[in-house]
Amino acid sequence: MEKQSWAEPYKIKMVEPVFETTREQRQKAIKESGYNTFLLKSEDVYIDLLTDSGTSAMSDRQWAGMMLGDEAYAGSRNFFNLEDAIREFYGYRFVVPTHQGRGAEHILSQLLIDDGDIVPGNMYFTTTRLHQELAGGKFADIIVDEAHDPKITFPFKGNVDLTKLEKLIAEHGAEKIPYVCIATTVNMAGGQPISMKNLKELRELTNKHGIKIIHDMTRVAENAFMIQQLEAGYSDRSVKEIVKEICSYTDGATMSAKKDAMVNIGGFLAVNDEQLFDDARNLVVIYEGLHTYGGLAGRDMEAMAIGIAESVQDKHIAARVGQVQYLGRKLLDAGIPIVLPIGTHGVFIDAKQFLPHIPQEEFPAQQLAAEIYLEAGVRSMERGVVSAGRDQVTGKNHMPELELVRLTIPRRVYTQAHMDVIAEAVIRVYKRREEVQGLKMTYEPKYLRFFQARFQPIAPEPNDTTHENDETFASCTVGGADSGVGQL
Ligand code: F0G
């Protein structure tokens, strides 16, 4: 059959220049950033794959919507447009806007979790778990085992292992489990979807025990696309229909609209239970703002409402995931170890296989992210032992099976040519991988340490002329080494 290529369903109306730096400039920048890509200045980055969060390009429709912002303190028309969009596309009854996803996680956790509760989930997410823990709960991982092995090609690695959940219920009792937290497209597993079949089975099981399902719907459209592509019975259903069906099996949702919905800021909590809604809109005024703006400007809510509608269009999502798959296949063809199957929002490099000579205690993924930056100014993110943090009770490091570097693709921002440049940079680092050495942590913040932690090479790099300032690191303390309770 003749080859038929796909192309993006848009043309570009406005561009922003990006700038390349020299290797010396990057060497200085990464050292000054304590080998943490979160601490780099964006100006020092050529292609920014740190995250797909808040980094997407808005459409002309969204920008036009920004001009229709009704900046009233209370009852802004844009709130009602947002509420309509959430009801139409997701089917949830009640909406509380928040400044971003973690704002919604905070409110929900405070309302539903009591001291000593267990909150099962299909793998943890950093902010979600922290809010559960700060509310007195304990996260329990109930994702299928396949999700922890980057080499297994099982298509629905986001699935819940129902036996693990049944065990938890038997052990603790359903009354200790306020809800099961289900992410569609599991970020920390490498952008892996959950199947509709599994979700339906989970609904049956939780119904039997009167346990709620709360949906982390940050990337639900991407998950719906994978169901359309891979799950029996869904190939002729639209992404829009599949998204709504997913939501119908859940009781409420937290959303970071900075991803799927392609806004630079925004999120919400959506629920079906009226009492829970009443409680949430009361609590939101303490932390975010009045319940009709939740920390957002009217214009942000308008852009979000429009972005939600755009996010479920089949052609959009096919191009979005198609670009990620294009990069993934390029890396696979070059023999680079990545998480399989290729994810939907990014390509996740397996740092344990890429740098087998660096033990996990020396932060191989952290170092690999720094090396990729050094090579070509491409900024990525560690998703391994640094992101996993410490056990809240013992203070010991979590040692996740997955030690990954995430090349996260913003939506509608970069071209296929950028993907080629990124792949070539990673391949060059792979060729010299034996030279790469481990890191030690020199500063560890108490919460979500990956954002601000600092590191230093265990041994100075051979060509590095920028080591004069090492005492800056030496004077920093490692906060968590013997931290005990409360360290994360
Ligand atoms: N849930 C998931 C699955 C996420 O990926 C994120 C954010 C959040 C919740 C929190 O949302 O950032 O709006 O407060 N993920 C970003 C990322 C930060 O880079 O993966 P937020």
Image (cartoon, rainbow, N blue to C red):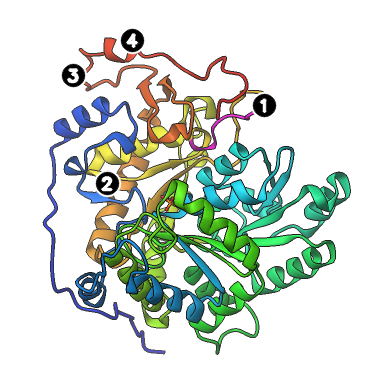
**Residue that carries the numbered disc 1 in the rendered image:** 393
**Which circle, 1 or 3, is nearer the viewer?**
1
Earlier in the chain: of badge 3 and badge 2, it is 2
Disc 1 and disc 3: Cα gap in Å?
42 Å
Earlier in the chain: of badge 1 and badge 3, it is 1
**Residue that carries the numbered disc 4 in the rendered image:** 475
Disc 2 and disc 1: Cα gap in Å?
37 Å
Residue at x 42% of width, y 48% of height: 406
**Which circle, 4 or 1, is nearer the viewer?**
1
**Residue that carries the numbered disc 3 in the rendered image:** 465
Q: Secondary structure at mark 3?
A: loop
Residue at x 42% of width, y 89% of height: 1
Residue at x 45% of width, y 46% of height: 287
Disc 4 and disc 2: Cα gap in Å?
29 Å
Earlier in the chain: of badge 2 and badge 1, it is 2
**Residue that carries the numbered disc 2 in the rendered image:** 378
Q: Quadrant of residue 369?
A: top left
Image coordinates for residue 69, horizontal then vertical, percent: 25, 69
**Three-letter amino acid code of the residue under disc 3:** Thr
**Three-letter amino acid code of the residue under disc 1:** Val
Image coordinates for residue 475, horizontal then vertical, percent: 33, 10
**Magenta region: which residues?**
387-393
Confirm or deny contact between disc 2 and disc 1 (CB under 8 A): no
Confirm or deny contact between disc 4 and disc 2 (CB under 8 A): no
Mark 3 surroundings within 10 Å by alpha-carbon count, few (fewer than 14), some (14 through 19), many (20 or more) = few
Earlier in the chain: of badge 4 and badge 2, it is 2
